[in-house]
Image (cartoon, rainbow, N blue to C red):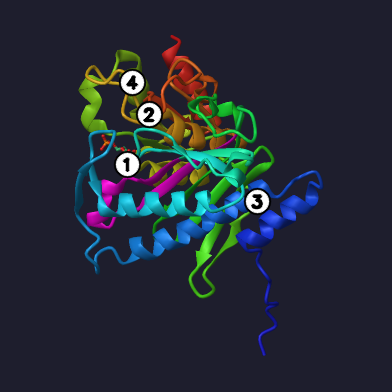
């Protein structure tokens, strides 16, 4: 007879309800919204896990706002998240990487909901056909326009520091949902046996330092001198300097940033000569990860200021992006200010 106690792990639903009980003034809207996102993530996970078996691979034949070929999975994922949020009780509207304009739900319950959501429904989707880890990234804001009226773009163009919550889903060797509120970062692993996200990584903290630097080295000739100087410092780290460092780059931001959040490291997507603002989008890629990593003790910058302090003026604007362990980011920032 095994003497192992069958330790009951908290599901995402149980955890969000427990959080709500700890804060009596909570209305439960945020807990409902997070559970809605978890439901959509489970539906996306089923399709991602069998993408090679059904005719869901390949290009959808259209081009999204970013001018990128839209994979069928992008469209499916986008529809899943819109569906659960539109039919929930917590969300007035949504800004998506896949859609040029915001989606205003504009029904009585949605117009009276407290929150709006920004989302990249399936980041790294070009990796789908080659079975590389991909992810969903989202941020949650309290709306600033009058409750009872349809949400407007003003609700979405807030600084990342205003996020009430932010998170991501990583569809990898296991599927995890990680989300942060100002109270902490918690990770939930999907247990296929019961179809629930279960608390597997409570109170995630980003290691103060690490040995991994992550960037697309193929663009090195297009980076500024200060960036190249920092990369050279990474390459020259010796044991006494906390090195040697290793370079890791999946080419799927969710995978690269998740690894660094857990093990320590720095991820960089600098601007280049051709694209001074880089490739990554501020609202639904950089702000959510910056919120999560800052709550976990790390830092995130555009090379000049904290990502979370940037005042957005467009839904799809891009930004140079540097994020990771506190001490590595401080060394990077000292290089940029030298
Ligand atoms: P590159 C995926 O397309 C993505 O948006 C991020 O997930 C990833 O970090 C980046 O682009 C990869 O871009 O130019 O290195 O292929």
Query: Tag on residue 316?
Result: 2
268 in relation to 111, above or below: above
* The label number, if any, that marks residue 277 in the structure image: 4
Q: Residue at x 54, y 24 (%)?
A: 159
Rendered residue at 68%/79% (across/down): 4
User: 278 left or right of 67?
Assistant: right
Residue annotated with mark 3: 31
Q: Position of residue 56 (x, y in %)?
A: 25, 61
Q: Secondary structure at mark 3?
A: helix
Q: Which residue is mark 1?
A: 249
Mark 3 and mark 2 in contact (Cβ < 8 Å)? no
Q: Give x and y (percent) for residue 239.
A: 44, 35
> From the viewer's perspective, is 220 left or right of 157?
left
Q: Locate residue 255 relative to residue 295 in the image: left or right.
A: left
Residue range of the region highlighted in magenta in the rendering: 119-142
What residue is shown at x 24% (from left), y 67% (from top)? 54
Spatial CA span between label 4 and label 1: 20 Å
């Amino acid at each position: 007879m095994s003497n192992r106690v069958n330790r009951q792990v908290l599901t995402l639903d149980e955890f969000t309800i427990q959080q709500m009980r700890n804060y009596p003034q909570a209305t439960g809207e945020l807990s409902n919204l997070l559970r809605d996102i978890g439901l959509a993530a489970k539906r996306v996970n089923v399709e991602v896990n069998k993408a090679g078996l059904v005719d869901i691979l390949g290009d959808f034949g259209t081009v999204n706002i970013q001018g990128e070929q839209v994979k069928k999975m992008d469209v499916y994922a986008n529809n899943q998240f819109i569906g659960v949020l539109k039919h929930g009780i917590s969300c007035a509207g949504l800004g998506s990487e896949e859609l040029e304009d915001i989606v205003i739900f504009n029904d009585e319950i949605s117009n009276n909901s407290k929150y709006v959501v920004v989302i990249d429904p399936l980041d790294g989707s070009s990796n789908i056909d080659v079975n590389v880890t991909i992810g969903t990234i989202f941020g949650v804001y309290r709306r600033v326009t009058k409750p009872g009226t349809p949400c407007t773009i003003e609700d979405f163009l807030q600084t990342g520091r205003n996020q009430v919550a932010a998170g991501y889903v990583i569809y990898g060797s296991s599927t995890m949902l990680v989300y942060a509120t100002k109270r902490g970062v918690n990770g939930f692993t999907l247990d296929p046996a019961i179809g629930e996200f279960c608390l597997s990584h409570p109170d995630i903290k980003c290691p103060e330092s690490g040995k991994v630097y992550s960037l697309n080295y193929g663009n090195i000739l297009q980076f500024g001198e200060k960036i190249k100087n920092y990369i050279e410092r990474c390459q020259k780290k010796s044991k006494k300097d906390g090195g040697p460092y290793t370079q890791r780059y999946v080419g799927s931001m969710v995978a690269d940033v998740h690894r660094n959040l857990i093990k320590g490291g720095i991820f960089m997507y600098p601007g280049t000569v051709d694209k001074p603002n880089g490739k990554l989008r501020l609202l639904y890629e950089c702000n959510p990860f910056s919120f999560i990593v800052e709550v976990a003790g790390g830092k995130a910058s555009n090379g000049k200021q904290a990502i979370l302090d940037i005042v957005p003026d467009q839904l799809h604007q891009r930004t140079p992006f540097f994020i990771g362990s506190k001490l590595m980011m401080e060394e990077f920032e000292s290089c940029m200010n030298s």
